[in-house]
Image (cartoon, grey):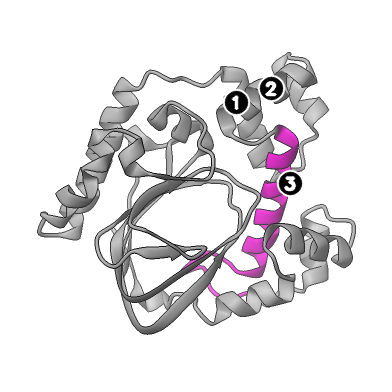
Amino acid sequence: MFRLARVPATLRGTVRRLVAFDEGSEVVVRRRQAPTSTCTLVVGLADPLRVDGVEHAAFVTGLTVASAITEFAGHQAGVQADLTPVGALRLFGVALEGLVGLDALGPDLARLPDRLADLPSWSARLATVVAVLERRLATTGRIPDPEVARAWARLEHSAGRHPVAALADDVGWSRRHLTRRFTAQIGLSPTTAGRVLRFRRAADLLVPPVGAGGSTVRIADVAAACGFADHAHLDREFAALAGCSPTEYRAGWSTVAVDPADVVHG
């Protein structure tokens, strides 16, 4: 079961997606988690998830250029919130680096797994996560520079194709100053963030998000649509960021993709 919840107006711009999940498998389910344009908050309620061989139950990840392999066998359940990098800064007060356990981010987050486990329904669990995030927004007081937020929005809107020099001109800063402030608040430099966004657009065209249907698009067409010089350029970026070729990436996800029939909206 994957329950995609409506993100309330109070969290728009901070939370991109909110989902409750509950799945089981007698055999090991292995997924390649390539870089994305969001930070990920996971509150696990069942068996730990192995990330690159290390077990984690409740954690948040920042933006990264490194892929990871997740594995589980048995029962996986919990709540996941995909956060914008600007929203993550507002929630946690710092730009996240790598994977961070919730117990390092404050008692309200550290207590979330136990609180959710005591609740009787997924609706109640989702509402509790929303309430905790809303309180954090009201109390952390870490507001990103408007120039950084605007530069991120323009970079994301262009799927990473907006030149850094143009971003600097847009916000009225020097390229050096933008790079320094952007990196401190987003977690990646504008150049690296643009690279991740271009890759992510290509990955989503190859393997659409859950419930969006399959993809038969040609890899060469994906390369052209996302601003890569050619198929070989896209191959190199997938090797660097995902650890595999575009063909291998699509084939891997086709074997573990969620059945749309298992996705509940509401």
Residue placed farthest to the bottom in the image? 26
Left or right: 108 as drawn, with respect to 261: left
Q: Is residue 81 above or below residue 244?
A: above
Q: Residues within 10 Å of mark 2 (few under 14, many from 20)?
A: few
Left or right: 58 as drawn, with respect to 252: left
237 or 206, which is in the foreground? 237
Q: Secondary structure at mark 3?
A: helix
- First reached walking from the N terminus: tag 1 or tag 3: 1
Q: Amino acid at mark 2?
A: Arg
Residue at horizontal 75%, vertical 64%?
239
Residue tagged 3: 195
Q: Is residue 88 visible?
A: yes
Q: Is residue 42 visible?
A: no
Q: Is residue 151 above or below residue 217?
A: above
On residue 180, which mark appears?
2
Instruction: Locate residue 241, reporting x and y percent.
Output: 70, 57
Residue 55 shown in magenta: no
Residue tagged 1: 184
Mark 1 or mark 3, whichever is nearer to me: 1
Q: Which residues are magenta?
A: 190-215
Instruction: Locate residue 37, reporting x and y percent.
Output: 58, 47
Q: CA distance from mark 1 to mark 3?
A: 17 Å
Quarter that holds the N terminus:
bottom left
Circle count = 3
Residue at horizontal 80%, vertical 27%?
166
Mark 2 or mark 3, whichever is nearer to me: 2
Q: Which of the 4 image quarters holds residue 193? A: top right
Residue placed farthest to the front in the image? 54
Q: Residues within 10 Å of mark 3 (few under 14, many from 20)?
A: some
Q: Amino acid at mark 3?
A: Arg
